[in-house]
Image (tube, grey):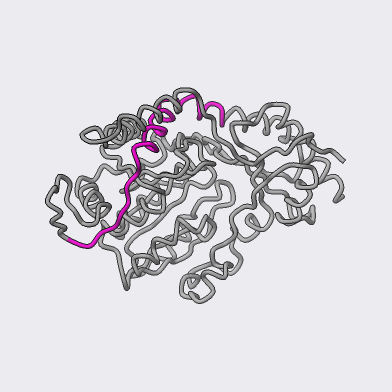
Amino acid sequence: MIRAPELIPVAGPWITEREVEYVTDAARNAWFSNHYEYNRRFEEAFAAYVGVKHAVSLPHCTAAIHLSLAAAGIGAGDEVIVPDVTWIASVAPVVYVGATPIFADILKDTWCIDPRSVEAAVTPRTKAIIGVDLYGSMADWSELRRIADRHNLLLIEDAAEALGSEYGGRKAGSLGDTGVFSFHGSKTLTTGEGGMFVTNDDHLHQRVMTLRDHGRPPGDKLFLNTEIGFKYKMSALQAAFGLAQIERVEELIARKRDIFSWYKDALGGVEGLTLNAEPKGTLNSYWMVTAIPDPSFGMDKFALMAAFRERNIDTRPFFSPLSSLPAFAERPESSAHMPECPVGETIAKFGINLPSGYHMTKEKVRTVCAAMRDILSSTS
């Protein structure tokens, strides 16, 4: 049995002296009148990279989705269409504001929300669509934009996993009315924890700036809160870390694409195994290299993960359908528009994420791929 000589983790960051220097300087100097300097620089650099007018640094991506919905006035009695297969953080904020998440199926190739399923789920109560750029793939933003415009809906792009990906020459995060990003330790760009809200809409930006600071309008120094808001700010230390990372973003994206190319070269000829897609007109930043074995191999994702674990290789399961989770068991209305045989059900049952962190080398990728071939051949 092929076994890695030491554990190969599924994810990991790429940290240089630049990050250390910036964070050290922030610890010493980001106080008093300089307390927001690193946040400002990070936000400006991030907005310029994504190609948007406004960026707001936050403690996590979940806050960015929450603020997007709250800033648009979405609440009780409203519906928000979301992909059935995604991480729960993409959908939980819909419940935070008192609205109802409505699940839609995903596409077979990109694993992103299916516009046809979205269209079928629109009702008079629908107020927004949240599209998720899953594992670095890009949703069909032209069709989602058409649907949103036709029904006068807010369009939120959850680009938490897709920094650096592109659709029609535009960067991920710039294709919705708002865009949101995650800087969790596993992400392409990290601040340990953290997130970013982006938009070209001046009104939504101003609402977010007020709501994220306990309902204080920007510039308020008298604690005269105009409404009840939230406490969603990023620390200067995190912003300093993020600034160093965004200044290195091109090499970060290039390394992610290199890692995927090593996997593709090694696994491309394995019949019955599907990897991340990159349809024409898109660029995939390949946050997580993801493999979907054909059901004929007879191994679901948990069995496949166990086999890799025996070989000293860490993996992650493809996100399970939200409609299948205990967390949504008491919300049958959320699944009212799902098709009888969802595409996402099979993909989610068998897919796994392979080690994709910046610690990966060609040699480690070869080891993972040899293990994959070994595991799949043992089922035949």
Q: Residue at the spot x=44%, y=60% of the render?
A: 91
Q: Residue at the spot x=21%, y=52% of the render?
A: 210
Residue 34 in the image: state x and y as whole percent.
Answer: 24, 32
User: Is 315 on the left-hand or right-hand side of 175?
Assistant: right
User: Is 218 on the left-hand or right-hand side of 246?
Assistant: left
User: If the image is split into quadrants, where does the N terminus sit?
Assistant: top right
Residue 351 in the image: state x and y as whole percent.
Answer: 66, 51
Q: Residue at the spot x=75%, y=35% of the render?
A: 6
Question: Quick one: which residue is furthest to the front in this view?
Answer: 28
User: Is 4 on the left-hand or right-hand side of 216?
Assistant: right
**Magenta residues, as a range?**
227-256
Q: Nearer the viewer, residue 273 or 52?
A: 52
Type of secondary structure dominating the magenta stretch: helix
Does 240 lie within the magenta span? yes
Q: Nearer the viewer, residue 327 or 156?
A: 327
Q: How many marks?
A: 0
Residue 307 in the image: state x and y as whole percent.
Answer: 79, 49
Does 238 lie within the magenta span? yes
Residue 52 in the image: state x and y as whole percent.
Answer: 30, 37
Q: Residue at the spot x=69%, y=26% of the render?
A: 362
Q: Nearer the viewer, residue 361 or 26?
A: 26
Residue 55 falls in which quadrant of the image? top left
